[in-house]
Image: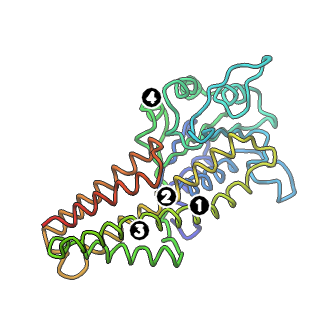
Amino acid sequence: MTDTGESRSLQSLRKAVKEGRLAHGILLHGESLETLEREAFVLAGDLLEPIAEDSNKKHPTNHPDLFEIRPAGKSRTFLIGEAERGHFPPNTIRRLTTDIQMTSNQGGNKVAIIHEADRLVKFSANALLKTLEEPPENTYLILLTTNPYKVMSTIRSRCFRFHINAPVPPVDNEDWIQWKTDYGDWIKALGNLRAGGKPAVSKAIFGLYGLAARFDIINKSLSADSIATETSSLPENASKELKDAAESRVLRGKLLQLLQEVEKATGDIVLRGSNQTDPESISKYIKTIAKLEELKGLLVLNLKDITAFEYFMLHTLRIWSQA
């Protein structure tokens, strides 16, 4: 990030707008969807004509030539949309591509923002592909994703890609800070599991399920606060599908943030004191992180969060208790 709070990628894109050389297909990717959305709206604001003197209405989301589409429902998929009485339903790919083919409302540029573009599957991606290949004049498509390599190659190849750095601050929550401390103590105790016999094994297992249950409670509490903030920013007439998608996005985002901190907490154990040069500890750390990555894959398949996390913890117990 620069002194202005903008990423260097955004500054380059804004310069391209001023010089009239911005590509019509832009893929913004990075660690934080919130940051991607914020910078996409800044870019959209540069491309669109002013809409009012009232500063409260100047945000690009109020502009008649800005079009957005998000994954719908708890499964977070993009709906293609079948015509109903000659019109396509809102928040569908067909509606989006139809809208941006129309003449600009204010005679200037048109901008379409596709949120979470990695959720575009074959049929929805194909429905968008022709528009990316042959965009209407003065039309710009901005795709956002935290998983660029899950965006279909046919879509990626038709966009200019820009990485947006967004260091995520640690979760500032007393219960979570205590959880990470207890998690570290639990892992360190696993090294003496065999010597401690059945009492030590029982304590480790009870500790495992206790940590998993507390993790679930903390995750839900933090997510509830974020969901309230997210949904309050949606339009008053937002559909249930849009609200469900927003909720699902927040739940996954918060969970992945916590898992990143679990990874760091595990690394802190290995890099502390003599462990940092111990090949066995480093090997166990690598195996634990591999299981964390596997856990993220299970979550993409919409496996129940607590079940997936218990799966990870059971494997962590096995890894760190081995001689």
User: What is the x, y in percent for residue 229?
Assistant: 69, 61
Mark 4 or mark 2: whose residue is earlier in sequence: 4
* Kind of residue indicated by mark 4: Thr
Q: Is residue 21 visible?
A: no
Residue highlighted by disc 1: 223
Residue highlighted by disc 3: 211
* Kind of residue indicated by mark 2: Leu
As measured in the structure, the alpha-carbon distance from the residue carrying label 4 to the one carrying label 1 is: 34 Å
User: From the viewer's perspective, is 184 left or right of 104?
Assistant: left
Q: Which residue occupies 58% across, 48% down?
A: 248
Residue highlighted by disc 4: 154
Which of label 1 and label 3 is nearer to you? 3
Q: Determine crowd level at label 2: few under 14, some 14-19, many 20+ residues with C-alpha closer than 10 A.
A: many
* Residue farthest top in this picture: 86
Residue highlighted by disc 2: 255
Which of label 3 and label 4 is nearer to you? 3
User: What is the x, y in percent for residue 301?
Assistant: 44, 41
Q: Which residue occupies 14% across, 73% down?
A: 278
Mark 2 or mark 1: whose residue is earlier in sequence: 1
Which of label 3 and label 2 is nearer to you? 3
As measured in the structure, the alpha-carbon distance from the residue carrying label 3 to the one carrying label 4 is: 43 Å
> Colour scheme in the image?
rainbow
Q: Determine crowd level at label 3: few under 14, some 14-19, many 20+ residues with C-alpha closer than 10 A.
A: many
Which of label 4 and label 2 is nearer to you? 2
* Kind of residue indicated by mark 1: Ser
Regarding mark 3 in the picture, which secondary structure is present there? helix
Mark 1 or mark 3: whose residue is earlier in sequence: 3
User: What is the x, y in percent for residue 20?
Assistant: 62, 42
As measured in the structure, the alpha-carbon distance from the residue carrying label 2 to the one carrying label 1 is: 8 Å
Q: Badges 4 and 2: C-beta atoms under 8 Å apart?
A: no
271, 16: nearer the viewer: 271
Mark 4 or mark 1: whose residue is earlier in sequence: 4
